[in-house]
Image (tube, helix red, strand yellow):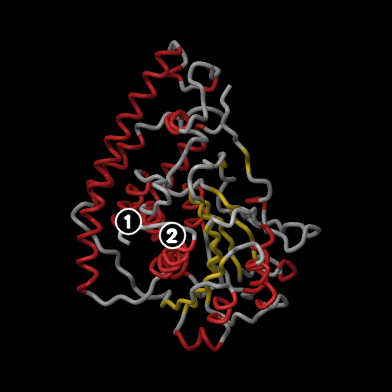
Amino acid sequence: MTRLTRTLALTTLAGLVPLAAAQTAPAEPNPATEPLLIDRDAERPLVQLALLLDTSGSMDGLIEQAKTQLWAIVNELATSRRDGQPPILEVSLYEYGKQSISLQENQLRQILPLTSDLDAVSQALFALRTNGGEEYCGAVIEAAAKGLTWSEDRNVLKMIVIAGNEPFTQGGVDYRQAVPEAIARGVIVNTIHCGDRQTGIDSGWADGARLGDGEYSFIDHNADLAPIAAPQDEQLISLGVELNRTYIAYGAHAAEGRMRQEAADASAEDASAPAAAQRATAKAGALYRNAMWDLVDAFKEGEVDLKEIDADELPEEMKNLKPDERVAYVEQKQAERAKLQTRIQELSKARDAYVAAERVKGAQGETLESALLKAIRAQGERVGLAFESD
């Protein structure tokens, strides 16, 4: 049998995360299936990021930015190191301000718990839909602060990032009460006001970040942000497809894992070629881990004994292989993957240089991506993370 821990999140996509243990979740349709969680590698630094997104009627632009810029954020984090080790990234997702969720539940919902299943995060983001409601920032911050399994290690980067456009003061939970709940758990609170700078200051968004020891940013969430296409995009997308062929789906979650990987690829490609190229880069990086369903990752991370694993857990092409042949087969796929990853990373560096040069030519305001990356870099340095371009 494998030694891999396959733990399904307990409350995640069954509905809204309650503000108190006694509350029950409403019957709200869920945008994704439960993420697959694996044991953390204790030798690697940990980054925990909770995204709290306003999904009221005026926030389509914000959701679009979140969907298309996810992999760029992952790629930036993948360049960071502490003591030579890349981090493990865990992401949680909340929505708030949705009319279809009851006012009794503060019109907010946990969609994902903290998970390193990045394909599940992508799937959940692409499934988000806006629906006008009341935006209670204090309530959703309190829900994330109390409802997530935050690490108790003070060297872990723990962040809440909340984005929206209505006054920060709305609702029955005062942000001046909720933010300290996060700080008490070592969680930094960053705020992104979807609107102009002064309105965000006047309506409490800047003060929320001040209390949360975080960054206050403001963005034009409805700006028409055409992604910058690069000459490397199509080749990166093609290499990303080849990379998928090195995955060996096995165990109880084989079909689910494979499906989710392909769905995330398709969503990124439907969004734009640059988004798909960023997705391919992310798959070649250290933060993209799939030991919960991929035999190559599980073998690399020491989560499975190929000589002892039950044949029933193996894919058809491996069921009749002898123990040594299993090892040879997986090692071959591992070598193929490493070669593709190296090529993707080389192309990605050339792409980054091209995009940076093109970006200088046109003035572009702050986006969800740039606001998040500014906070991640500044706050990552506090826990000893160094980024490639530092």
Q: Residues within 10 Å of mark 2 (few under 14, many from 20)?
A: many
Expressed as whole percent of the image width and height from the top left, the position of residue 124 reads: 52, 54
Q: Is mark 1 on a helix, strand or loop?
A: loop
Instruction: State whether residue 336 is above or below residue 61.
Output: above
Residue 211 occupies which quadrant of the picture? bottom right
Residue 273 position in % (x across, y down) = 29, 55
Q: Which amino acid does label 1 sit on?
A: Glu
Please state if 275 lies on the left or on the right of 230 as rendered. Answer: right
- Residue drawn at (47%, 69%) of the image: 60
Out of 44 and 312, give the one closest to the viewer: 44
Percent across and percent down for residue 153 are: 60, 53
Q: In this view, does 243 lie above or below 175?
A: above
The quadrant in which the C terminus is found is bottom left
Going by the numbered disc 2, the residue's amino acid type is Lys
**Picture coordinates of residue 332, whole percent (x, y):** 33, 24
Spatial CA span between label 2 and label 1: 24 Å
Along the horizontal axis of the image, is 242 left or right of 220?
left
Label 2: which residue?
67
Q: Name the residue under label 1.
A: 388
Residue that sits furthest to the right in the current view:
22
